[in-house]
Amino acid sequence: MRKVLLLGLMLFFASAVAFAQDRVITGTVTSAEDNMGVPGATVLVKGTTIGTATDIDGKYSISVPAGNNVLVFSFVGLRQQEVTIGTRTTVDVVLESDVTALGEIIVTGYGSQPKREVTGAVSSVKGEAIQNLPMQSFDRALQGRAAGVQVRSSNGLPGGAVNIRIRGVGSINAGNEPLFIVDGVQLNNQSNSNFTQSNPLAFLNPNDIESMEILKDAASAAIYGSQAANGVVIITTKKGKQGKAKFEFNAFSGQTQPMKYLDVLGGAEWYEMRRDAHINSNSASPEADALNAMGRRPSNWQTLSREQLNQIGLDLPTYDWQREVMGTGKIQNYELSVSGGDAKTTFFLSGSYNYQESSFKPVDFERGTVRVALAHQANDRLNLETNINLSTFQQNVPFSIDGAFLGNPAFSASAVLPHNAIYNEDGTFNTAIGGVLGQNIVLVNAYNSGLQRTNTVVGNVIGTYKILDNLSYRALVGLDYRLLQGDSYRDPRTPDGAGVRGRSSVQSDWRTRFITTHTLNWNKTFNGVHSVSAILGGEFLSETREGISGAGIGFPTFQFRTIQSSATPESITGFWTGYRRAGIFLSANYDYKKKYLATVTARYDGSSRFGTNNQYGLFPSIRLGWSIVEEEFLKQSTAVSELKLRASYGLTGNDQIGNFDARGLYGGGGNYAGSAGIRPTSLANLDLGWETNTTLNFGLDYGFFSNRVTGSVDVFDRRTKDLLLSQPVLWTNGFDNIANNVGELQNKGIEFELSTVNIDKGGFRWNTTFNFTYIKNQVLSLYDGLQFLPANPGIAVGQPVGNPATQGVQAPGAWFVAEYAGVNPATGRPMWYDINGNITYLPLAADRVYKGSNLATTFGGLNNTFSYKGFEATAFFTYEYGAVVNDGQYGFLRENGTRLALNALREVNERTWTAPGQITDIPRNLTTNAGNETRGAGRNSGSAGLLKADFIRLSQVTLAYNFQSSLVSKIGLSKARLYVQGLNLWTYTDYPGYDPEFTGAGTGQIPLTKNYTVGVQIGF
Amino acid sequence: MKFINKAILSLALGSTLLVSSCDSLLQVDPRQSIDANGALNTPDAMDAALNSVYARLRSVRNYGRDLLALSDALADVGQTTSNSGRLIGENNNQPNAHFQAGFWQNSYFAINEANLIIDGLAGVEGASQAQRDRWEGEAKFLRALYYFDLIKVYAYMPTAIYQPGVIDEGGVPLELTGVITSGEALGRQTSRATIDEVYTQIYTDLEDAKRLLTSRGTQYASSAAASALLSRVALYRGDWAKAASEATTALGSNVGTVLGGNAYVSGWRSSINPESMFEVRFALAEESIGVNESLQSSYTALLNLTNKNSQGGWGDFIPNATVRGFFGLTPLQTGSPATDNNNWDVTRNSDVRAQLYTTGNTVRGAGRQIESTKFMSKSGFAYADNVPVIRKSEMHLNRAEANYHLNNTAEALTELNAFKALRGLTAVNLSGQALLDEILLERFKEFAFEGHRFFDLKRYGKPIVKTTPAVNLAFDDFKILPPLPQREVDGNPNLNQNRGY
């Protein structure tokens, strides 16, 4: 402000001595972000000290001396622009926001810092980058945006779980989820729910996010001590800004579409495949047997000739079950926000509605949110702030969201035999379905019903008191409250409901987190060169989860669908669990002339989850930086605009285990003959303590040519010691495992981020951002000198672990299987290699070798943005390489209907061995012995069923047009933007299943969709 | 600066208070579990802990399915339909297609729980001697039953040991004290006891149970059930005199009733089979094993006997030609149209047990088959049946067999013929090997689909011969025994794997 006044004063004097030949130039400075005038922007005549500041509407007037022809416009957070005046008297400029500027402020642990001074490995994603993406939770939108952060959708459920791994998988049994903090509230991010997946992060409308910072190295995260072992994602939501109220209306709508339909066989093709399999199995009547498997053998078949029977098979029709069950879905999103404030009080209010259907009906997601952010400067010293997010979302759920259940649409749609009609001629459902899927999945899907509702309140109250000019106290009280409710009905008209005459299940689950954080912030500069700042704080967190659920069976008719109408209570159960965490922490920063930077932090944390002997842990860290660009020899350089070396080392802890894993307990279980039972459920380990992560990180931040090229490179070595491992206990000793601190795991890698302005000429601008990550994961040691875990030999020293699909499950380990050797060309038998490299038909346990894991080693993203005048185009690619997966759905279909009468894939069927000499990987079809050779392993055994899940995906394409503010202001708008957007339009992969991006078994999971949307954004 | 000092001091003090009070700050106790220390100190807790040991019998890996359906699939009782693809490998005697790791796991968990109960008897406050006797007796009965099931699966029978004395052929680890601390859990690495040691321990436990118990219903252990089990254990051990005498004791008890004629058939249709001397109870709807792996589901595609068109289970494992031949079973159309499954039944001979088979339905892939209906949701909810572990009829067959070996062939023949009369069969007059074969044949017919056949062949060292599928499993084939769970062998250097794995 002082600067502006000074400039104003100078202007005053300048005008006073103005010469006659001076020109007066007027105009308006607007921001490209919102098309609003920028008040207080600086306008300078280049090469002089003559300047002015814009008024509250962004207007200015400046007197330009003769011989000067260039104006320089600048404002904090916006990119400086030089404009040649020419013969104009009016010069309007639009300032772009300066995303790549290193002058930006980065939110770090319990504070913020200019990016120039950050010494840890921190990635930042701005809210704009993920704006208006039709994604229900912001974690999904992080995919490909930041180096070192691997994001995988667990499936295509809108609002479903997202698998996010920061710098690899660092734990085998404890959680691998990062800590998510929204406005200072550390969230419980468990996405489990009874009837579907309910991603807790979906409570927040992603468009309410201002920025996301990802603390990747242990030193940056160490101030969060416990729970920080897997990195920290800090979300800052939008806040009000001083100025008149700004309204923004935002709407988009569109469609979801399946990315892929599997190419499965038709009715006659399946018949032929099965008939030939019966011939291979020496059946006396292969035609009749094949028809029998399809439920189409006529009762007088013994009177018919083989030719007649064959003709029946060849005449079988084909019905496209996938296109009946899958299809397009709706997307809708509406939101309205208003922000503004005066010198004392600022506010931000927003409301939103979001609806999205998956490609499988009735799977959908419907959300409403309300958000309030208020800040009030009560007096010179006291500032009060509150952020409140209210959210409710509801998901219609299918019979089940995964698994080989006959009633699961995502399993059955591709697997049901294709000759079965979906409807009878009179339009009713066909219920005589031949094949192992003996139920009409369309009927099952239509008659059953279920939904899951999630109500969330995340809010905080913050008070900041300025004790001295350089010392302030900040108190935060936060709440994360969530209620999940669901019900599910098995209709008595469906096979699964028929036996019990209908079943209704209901469920409620409360998750409450309370957090309070108190910090003292202090800073001082000595002799103008030594800057010191410090944070001292304490924190307490308490979480409880409580649930009840029940089911009733025996309904009078299908119209009665709620539990009170059931004749017999079938089950009733509930649970209670809780935990607490408490800690104190200290962080101290020092820099010398912004040239040499140092930060030390320490946190002392306790968790109720650990054994009484070992509940507390100390987590220190140190970060050092050398801002080379501040050195004299680089200060004058025009080529190098930023250069900083960073080094950090820190220790973080992980306590993401069961709340009572350290306790020796007897729990309820084993009711018998109508009376209650108890049994020992866990072994006590009084010494159970923290799993610790140490990360050594070296980084380099660079910027060249006035920051037209910027980025960073980081190398890291992350080691997890004292793994919270479920150490196997011999079953003969009565238990399965005990939680113990044993073993060591390593994630070593390199991260690379690059952001360039390729072209910036004549209003045309082309930006590219690119990131790349490579991580090598391996187990360094286990316990007792063991080279592999007895209960899970895939977890072995020197091998990578896999990526656990969800919270609370063990990391799966590397694939440890016999190597597939293809099909014997002479006989069509599948072959494997034994441990000596010889062919075997029946591999033994000793023949297993390591074949990688489902954890990708390489991943990243590439974004290109082109803008010209009001037009804007974005193309965003993500990629992944190195994951080896087992896809259960593909596995079932790969069997060619030999074990179970399920449909098969055309490409697999065409590769099937049929004649001697044929070299292929798909064995001959058989019908006996579950489709396998009598003395041979199953056709999907060993590495035969493993797939590479590499892909490059065009994740996002956006075409937008921003109307000129001068144009839209005529109809009272400050801004108007139209856009069309497509998600997942194209994937480069040779993956044969639905989609390489999933986590878990893959069986019957709903795949991701393509999304098309059209949207409008209006500001007024 | 003074102010700063004060502020820091107060925060530091506050933090100190925070930390010093942290023991209570971090104190969270579970609400649905209790501390293992002293968990069994009350009579109610003892009762509840014992319930859990019984409940583990319900596991699919034990009496829920595998001890009946899987072991019969290994033997020559039936064939598979491929309707759900289950039990095919077992029926073909494929390597590794045998009793699963979960059977070992669940059984040893139950044994540990029983051991903890026995160890904890002294610590129960306010219990009567009668209660203590009951807990001890039932825990020992259950421990004996689990060990007997383990050893009959994982080891050879004392009557037919393949290459006795070969290093890798032993019994099973014999654990007789409970584990409740991490030290014991991680420290104890027990090797396989000899077969004889395990049988001796089973005897000891059953003798104790016999002495300590009375009867409180056939869903619980009783003195008579202990005698009956002893009779079978003795039979497997070749201890013929014991097998006969315990059979006599069991038959003399008022636990269970030997039924004949139609009463025998209706016994199978009632919730609690009157023949049972001990049966595993499925009392609550939530205990149903469900459509995939229940006994009903494994044996028949029918949901119930009243409407054969209703879609039920899978009917994966059905009688083979041998069993169909026992009872004269062939498909029989009883009405029209032929497409209605209710218009189908089977032909039957005079053997009343033929009533326990009928035609299924066309809902599943394999079409209408002749199926066993011994398990038809008798507990009152879908896919749950109480499972008889010992039926009193077995005592007659045990005693006849034992008497044959004791050279009391006249008694053996009399008992066999009396039993045949109960089943609607005419008497035979046989002697020597033919008599023994007839006794074993009667045992085959009586216990088809109840999981006896595989072990009856095994204890005589006989091969398994099947035509559908065409599989011959010689007695010297390693696949007679299942592998011990690999994790147990990997984690316990003292534990020898079975031959061939």
Image (cartoon, rainbow, N blue to C red):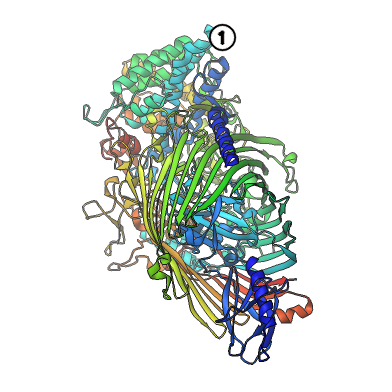
Q: Residue furthest top?
A: B129
Residue marked by disc 1:
B126
Q: Quadrant of the C terminus of chain B?
A: top left
For the N terminus of chain B, give its image quadrant. Answer: top right
Residue B371 in view: no
B344 left or right of A1016?
left
Q: Position of residue A909 (x, y in %)?
A: 42, 66
Furthest-front residue in view?
A: A17
Rendered residue at 45%/16% (across/down) = B118
Q: Does residue A213 appear in the picture of this structure?
A: yes
Label 1: state its secondary structure.
loop
Q: Residues within 10 Å of mark 1 (few under 14, many from 20)?
A: few
- The chain to which mark 1 is attached is B
| Residue A77: % across, % down | 59, 68
Along the horizontal axis of the image, is B238 left or right of B222? Answer: left
| Amino acid type, label 1 | Gly
Residue at image coords 60%, 42% = A518
Q: Exactly how many numbered labels are in the figure?
A: 1
The percent coordinates of residue A567 (x first, y second) are: 72, 37
Residue A545 location, x and y as percent? 61, 38
In the image, residue A86 above or below residue A668: below
In depth, the one of A89 and A716 nearer the eye is: A89
Relative to the observer, which residue lies in front, A836 or B404?
A836
Is residue B354 or residue A293 the one in the foreground? A293
